[in-house]
Amino acid sequence: MLRSVLLLFIVLFVSEGFLFAQKGTGKLYRIDRYESIYLPLGKISFADKLIEYKVGSPAPIQKYRDSVQCLHEPNYKNYQTPNFLSLGCGGSLTVEFTDNGFMNLPGDDLYIFEVGPSKEAAKVEISQNGIDWVYAGKIAGGKSSIDLSKEGIDGETVFYFLRITDLRDLCRSISAGADIDAIGAINSVIKLTINADVLFDVAKYDLKETAKKSLDSLTEIIKKVDKATILIEGHTDSDGSEITNMQLSENRCISVKERLMEIFGENALYDYEIKPYGESKPRIPNDSPQNKHQNRRVEITVLPPKDYYESISIKK
Ligand SMILES: [Ca+2]
Ligand SMILES: [Ca+2]
């Protein structure tokens, strides 16, 4: 009796966890018959735009060369339905994330939805700007996730571009090369940078009346994610002392945080974190008024929620 009650309890608990995961922004995506993967920012997480498709040689048959099939959420049905893109032997694919970026945070950071009967090896590279590329790892032998910390990628840079290059594993096939259904960022983020002059008067930390409007417009973007950690980082230029600048950027972060809390209300499922940097992290040298203007800024990053990281640390 006790055992069956306990079992019922476990079943309810598990199914409720499952339902919880299905509502809101975070979403489970099926990988195969047995496994799924959870993406905390849901459908925002996927690559949005095709930059370049260089078909390899031998090439896949024509129907597997519809390049946009690698974008947005996965929709693989079966091998006959060309809902995916085959790279061809040695071919490559470059995509851009436009409504999100991704970065190295705890756990796996990227997931490549590779489909079809054979999983071919491919190399993954990433870029902040689409010009400078860094090696991010390999997918091979059924392993489709990438943890950027394995390649020593820092935990601060937000990346927006990804390139996959087929490693010539399986060249004689009608779908030669890796077959890509979707490219998802597990550690997906939304980063917004606001010039501090828009928000504050010189050396002040109370928000200008006009600032409230610009923050309001940003909140529409943040609201696409129903549950998140909102990181607010403040930066000044090099005028004034380091101590004053640190204090100023801290007070400015607090002002922004308070305003966001006011807009979203107390029922919102957001946690806030502030990081004042003062003048310690200029974007460019503080050697002209224009450059100083660019260095004065507030950066708001929408990160996956804390309970997601708690859940992955329990699993490990
Ligand atoms: Ca996206
Ligand atoms: Ca990671």
Image (spheres, rainbow, N blue to C red):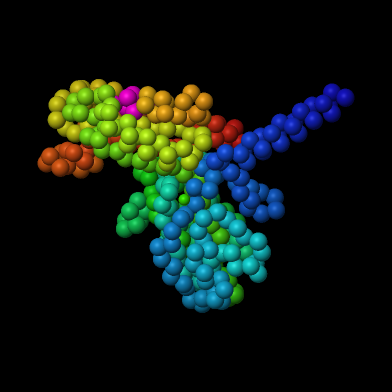
Quadrant showing the C terminus? top right
Identify the residue shown where x is 51% and y is 29%: 269
Q: Residue at image x 52%, y 71%? A: 65
Q: Position of residue 253 (x, y in %)?
A: 32, 27
Q: Position of residue 35 (x, y in %)?
A: 66, 49
Residue 235 visible (yes or no): no
In the image as oriented, which residue stretches furthest toward the left? 288
Magenta span dominant secondary structure: helix
Q: Inspect the magenta stretch and tell me whether residue 121 lies in it.
A: no
Give the residue at x 53% y 48%. Answer: 43
Image vertical order of residue 186 relative to residue 161, above or below: above
Between 280 and 81, the residue placed more toward the observer is 81
Query: Which quarter of the figure has residue 214?
Result: top left
For the N terminus, which image quadrant? top right
- Left or right, 126 with respect to 107, comes to left
Left or right of residue 249: residue 135: right
Does 285 sit above or below residue 205?
Answer: below
Asked if residue 256 is among those painted magenta in the image, a careful observer would answer: yes
Tell me residue 230's x, y (percent): 42, 32
Query: Looking at this view, is 59 or 300 the one in front?
Result: 300
Residue 75 sits in quarter: bottom right
State how many labels appear: 0
Which residue shows up at 21% across the image and 41% down it?
294
Q: Position of residue 26 (x, y in %)?
A: 56, 41
Q: Is residue 61 visible?
A: yes
- Magenta extent: 252-257
